[in-house]
Amino acid sequence: MAYDLVIENGKIIDGSGIPGFHGGVAVSGGRIVEIGQVSRAARRVLDADGLVVAPGIIDNHTHYDAQVTWDPLCTFSCYHGVTTVVMGNCSLALAPAHEEDRETLASVLSHVEAIPLEAIRAGVKWSWETIPQYLDALDRRLGINVASLIGHSAVRRYVMGEASQERHATDAEVAAMRAIVREGIEAGAVGVSFERNLRHFDWNGRLAPTNVASDAEIFAVAGVVDAVGRGVIQFGGDRKLGAQVARSSRCPVFYGNITQQAVAPDRWREQLTEAENMMRQGHRAYQFVMPRPGDLRYTLKTAQHFDALPSWKPVMLLPLEQRKQAFRDPEVRARLHREAVETPNNPRHAGDFTRRWDLQFVFRPALPKNQHLRGKSVAEIARDQGKDVLDVFLDLALEEELETEFERREVNSDEAAMTALLTSPYTVIGQSDGGAHVVFRTDYSYSTYLLSHWVREKEIMSLEEAIRKLTFVPASLFGLLDRGLVRPGMAADLMVFDPETIAPLEPGEAQDLPGGAKRRKQLAQGIEWTVVNGQVLLERGKHTGVYPGKVARNSASQSRSL
Ligand SMILES: [Zn+2]
């Protein structure tokens, strides 16, 4: 009998980290059945000459819980080689849900993760109450695979109602939460998620339920994964408490991310050392690193980061014409200069303006005559022109009616720091927040960015190692034991791409959310085929019309069903 699909002549990079090799990959019944020399004919043959055949990317931290119900492809992650997403992070989920709590769950998800509430209201067709029912509802129509964590906020709301956002739980309520988490994991959820972030509210200004829990409740509910012996714990916010949870559990715990920040230049090193120490002591304690830079773009019409400087704030709040006048006024400018250039940076105030003018770049000049400044830092232009940095910055913006687009490259952009963080065996690459922060962020392109920028251009690690970190590592840590490798017996989730051209494209905007809300859209180039469970989902970035995705269930439910 012929195979369903053979991808021939490609270079197979199998996800394990071993050097790539030439050969074919044969697929039958949604699984990989042969690699290397393929012994039979196939109903469909793809010629991957000059291309790499790798496992599909596993995005380990997303918030597609609502979006996946109206968009089973999970755009725009799927356009970056992603074949599986992990959702239900940061305590937020849409199950379990009593009918009367649907609006609250939507409200918390919307407010914490910056997903337009109208989109969730218009898009989600609720048909479930329990976690097993939610997973089964999703399983009916998926483009890519989704693995789901159980969100503690949803569970707490389900058990405690209004009180979930007001008080500590009783012993009986904690026991009820534990039972729900156990039922969810036995149905295939891949773990449970929590958060301790006292700035995360719903639309009514009340804390998300997880944030009202006592430490004891968090340990008790998280302890279910140890009792069942399967699943992971994701813990957002408070790193100290997250580390404590990691020390008390034998299951993988994801409890923070390490970010290089110009405003606090030594912090990433301390955090990396902490991650190393935890793992050397034998804990399964993981922290994420995002390969994409925090390349925030702004104009002097929209910038917010100067608001932290007392003499800048009133100026930035002026109407545009008066703001321009103030920027021209020599006395005002002297005051602005004192704070933004002469005052030394204070690393304790992370998030403030760094005063690093070498990290403020001209991204898009408005006038044709200024195009030669594109891509240069303000400090560099000041040196070239023999002018002061603030004069360069303000004069350019004034000449262009404050339309000049600048870019801050203060986060995850330092090459030495990022090389250390991305190549460390003690970090996990990811945390895209796909499906969240839809108006501002496109971190879901981290896979194509890693492969183009850090691997091809900067050569900080081999392609084999990068693929391993994007596929086999997250599959192993999240217990998705039949994914993340190109091996006979594994699910046939594959990304076939050109290593010379793969890259994210310049972001644009789409107005395609239910209810008409906008979001940032970023696609990729260089990916020929994305295969999910043996079927070609995307061909050169176009959906072929099939829905081969599945709920990726944890290994406990898999071994039970064998
Ligand atoms: Zn998150």
Image (cartoon, helix red, strand yellow):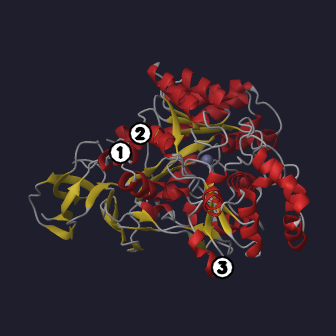
Q: Alpha-carbon neighbours of circle 2 within 10 Å: few (<14), some, or many (≥20)?
A: some
Task: Point out the residue furthest to the front here.
Answer: 386
In percent of width and height, residue 511 lies at: 63, 75
Name the one closer to the observer, 344 or 464: 344
Q: Residues within 10 Å of mark 3 (few under 14, many from 20)?
A: few
User: Left or right: 162 with respect to 552?
Assistant: right
- The quadrant of the picture occupied by the N terminus is bottom left
**Three-letter code, disc 2:** Thr
Is residue 249 or residue 311 the one in the foreground?
A: 311
For disc 1, the neighbor class at 10 Å (few under 14, some 14 to 19, many from 20) is some
Q: Give the residue type at disc 3.
A: Leu
Residue at left offset 75%, top offset 62%: 391
Q: Mark 2 highlights which residue?
A: 423
Image quarter (top left, top right, bottom left or bottom right) of the C terminus: top left
Can residue 129 be seen from the camera position used here?
no
- The residue drawn where x is 64% and y is 43% is 91
Report x, y in % for residue 266: 60, 33
Percent coordinates x, y for residue 124 in the rendering: 63, 64
Q: Earlier in the sequence, mark 2 or mark 1?
A: 2
What is the distance, in whole Å, between disc 2 and disc 1 at their CAs? 7 Å
Q: Quadrant of residue 318?
A: bottom right
According to the image, label 1 marks what residue?
A: 461
* Placement of 312 over or under 275, stated as above or below: below
Residues at marks 1 and 3, CA–CA distance in whole angstroms: 39 Å
Q: Earlier in the sequence, mark 1 or mark 3?
A: 3
Tell us which disc is closer to us: 2 or 3: 3
| Residue 367: assigned label | 3
Q: Residue at x 59, y 69 (%)?
A: 373
Q: Hey, which quadrant is residue 547 in on the image?
A: bottom left
Where residue 148 appears, as percent x and y from the top left, is 52, 47
- Amino acid at circle 1: Met
